[in-house]
Image: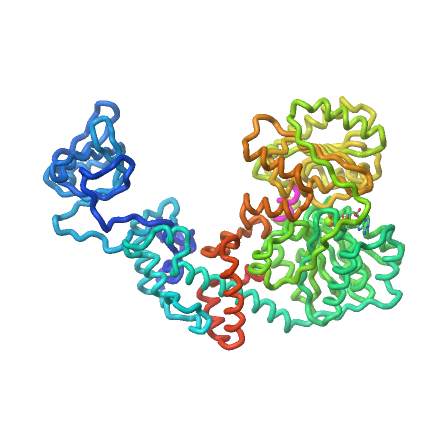
Amino acid sequence: MPDKSPSTLSIPAKAMLKLGLERDIDLALHLPLRYEDETRLTRVMDLRDGDTAQVEGIVRECRVDLRQRRQLIVKLDDHGAVLLLRFINFYASQQKAWAPGVRLRVRGEARHGFFGREMVHPTVKVVQEDTPLAASLTPVYPTTAGLPQAYLRKAVAAGLARAPLFEVLPPEVVPPGWPSLRESLRFLHHPSPEVSTFTLEDHSHPAWMRLKFEELVAQQVSQRQARMERAHLKAPALVGQPGGLHERLLAVLPFQLTTAQRRVTEEIAADIARPMPMHRLLQGDVGSGKTVVAALAAAVAIDAGWQCALMAPTEILAEQHLRKLVSWLEPLGITVAWLTGSLKSKAKREQLALVASGQAQLVVGTHAVIQDQVEFARLGLALIDEQHRFGVAQRLQLRRKLEDQALEPHLLMMSATPIPRTLAMTYLADLDVSTIDELPPGRTPIVTKVFSDNRREEVIERIREEAERGRQVYWVCPLIDETQESDEAADTRAGRETQRRPPLDLSNVTQTHEELSGALAGQGVGLLHGRLPAAEKAEVMARFSAGELKVLVATTVIEVGVDVPNASLMVIEHAERFGLSQLHQLRGRVGRGSVASVCVLLYSAPLSDQGKARLKAMAETTDGFEIARRDLDIRGPGEFMGSRQSGAALLRFADFGQDEDLVHQAGEAAQVMLERHPHAAQEHVRRWLGGKAEYLKA
Ligand code: ADP
Ligand code: MG
């Protein structure tokens, strides 16, 4: 075995590992970004301005010129037509090698300079009169610092030659007329010069189709396997009692369920009544009422004698769930435990004991709920709110934790970010989806206004009126550190709530807080951001919920789930700095009661055209599905899959937007393989996904 410890590797070899180019198959699947045509020579006399071309000629002169800037100038003669080659960076060895009389083959962009035709920094090769031209297009590979194209080309060519590229897909699942995998790869690495580079670049060539198909089949097989594995797992059958907790909870709710809420509640109840673990996503726009649906599922689980856990991405949100669930369930005799990273150790021990003994039927908290010390007596149902805010690693951690007991718990994930259909079919084929497609009645739609920052005074005046009428107001400021989309959520995702964090620029939010405190003296203006101690955050939130504070100046810590129905005005400062989905989430904090609500998007001029279009889109629609569609167009699928799990990283060749038909074909092929060719299915997943298969199942 060669020693592969990183310290003994050369720089390019390390860079290759970084790109994931380890096995021969990895190299064979590292496809060119584009191609260069070195199969032809262009006559220097035929060169037009701007042409990228390959030419050949004899060196007539090679000298260092010091007139303007030190540079190497080579005069190349092609049948009497002269081309100047200019190099700002060069080695003495090059000057020596390119001596007069030597034949050079060069490739670069031609232009007309001061002294006639020239190329700046072309690639250069010393050749003989009979040196053959390339027979195929030259691949240009995606690379990284420290990994020269030439080194990578050699490595890929070697990997391609060695990789065992036998056909794994049975002929019956491959669409007729498509090239084999080996043919496709050979072709894509070294296409013949007469092929249309357009079909290569837009990935519509049959060789590309074959590759995308292979990839999608692997992904679909692995998703279906995950579903089949789950079908073999046992979960407690959770069935509520007639007149039980579920019904008593319905009776004390201050409202009637919407038709959509009733429908999804029944879907969930039917699922958890089966002795196989549920794996379901509950999606519904902000304010559609997902929490009560989750609470009703919890009531069924508790009624059946099992524990239920609810995990939220931020402490503020978890706390709010806690308050709501306690107010609903404690009067009905249910004990609720509370787990977050900021609990003092004594309190934490007490809560852990409640969970371990089974005395607490419901556990609410942040990611602390899935930490190692937490042991459940009988966990039957896990609820994850705003699931897209958790990273893949945490979802995996949860599933592993759940493996500890003899029976798997059921899993219900909630999200206000609707998942586009192709995405649901590819990544989430192992997930059932319930959708709440209606808002509770009596909501007055939110009116959104887009104002320039110079109308700030006017806006503050409006806040005063609103507060005097007994209504409440949010004022949201972005964090200046643009890398932190939401301070608290980012921490939670990283799983280190208590560690030291780099300083953030909070000047915007604190200054605005001072400004508003001054302008609205006597109205109670609170300040909330992720860097406040947990107890202080909780206190500010509680005072705002109770109506003691009329105005809350906050960072995006309030983005997810915060629910104060009396709030009727939201001002978002520097709205141009937020993503569309984030603005929608923020805006969803108002319009939760029956009063007419307004959202003011303040921007600082000048605004780009795209920026204007984005804010206009926010003013035009309050439909989260429509906003998600527009956001998907702008940002790509990665954002939908949760933090660091980008669509691009998992699907390298296929594209959700463009390859919907292929996704369907691949789904059918995957089914056939699993039914009739289970060994091939296994082999195929191993070849394509290697160690990534686990991630795809999270
Ligand atoms: P989300 O789906 O964004 O999590 P919530 O569960 O926080 O929404 O619900 C938003 C608000 O609507 C809450 O104040 C909740 O009590 C209320 N609500 C939920 N369902 C109904 C209903 N059927 N009728 C009236 N109000 C409801
Ligand atoms: Mg919610």
| Relative image position of residue 25 (x, y in whole percent) | 39, 62
Q: Is residue 304 above or below residue 31?
A: below
Relative to residue 211, is residue 535 drawn left or right? right
| Relative image position of residue 695 (x, y in whole percent) | 55, 59
Depth check, front residue: 246 or 97? 246
Q: The C terminus lies in which quarter of the figure?
A: bottom right
The number of discs equals 0
Depth check, front residue: 362 or 697? 697
Question: Which residue shows up at 52% across the image and 61% down it?
Answer: 663
Relative to residue 78, is residue 248 drawn left or right? right
Relative to residue 637, is residue 163 drawn left or right? left
Q: Coloring scheme of the render?
A: rainbow
Q: Residue furthest bottom?
A: 676
Depth check, front residue: 258 or 295? 258
Q: Magenta region: which residues?
A: 487-493
Relative to residue 74, is residue 607 drawn left or right? right
The question of residue 451 being in magenta is answered with no
Residue 235 appears in which quarter of the rendering? bottom right
Question: Which residue shows up at 25% across the image and 23% down it?
Answer: 68
Q: The N terminus lies in which quarter of the figure?
A: bottom left
Question: Which residue shows up at 70% across the image and 56% down it?
Answer: 435
| Relative image position of residue 86 (x, y in whole percent) | 23, 33
Q: Main secondary structure of the magenta part?
A: helix
* Res 686 seen here: yes
Residue 465 appears in which quarter of the rendering? top right
| Relative image position of residue 163 (x, y in whole percent) | 35, 65
* Res 346 seen here: no
Residue 574 appears in which quarter of the rendering? top right
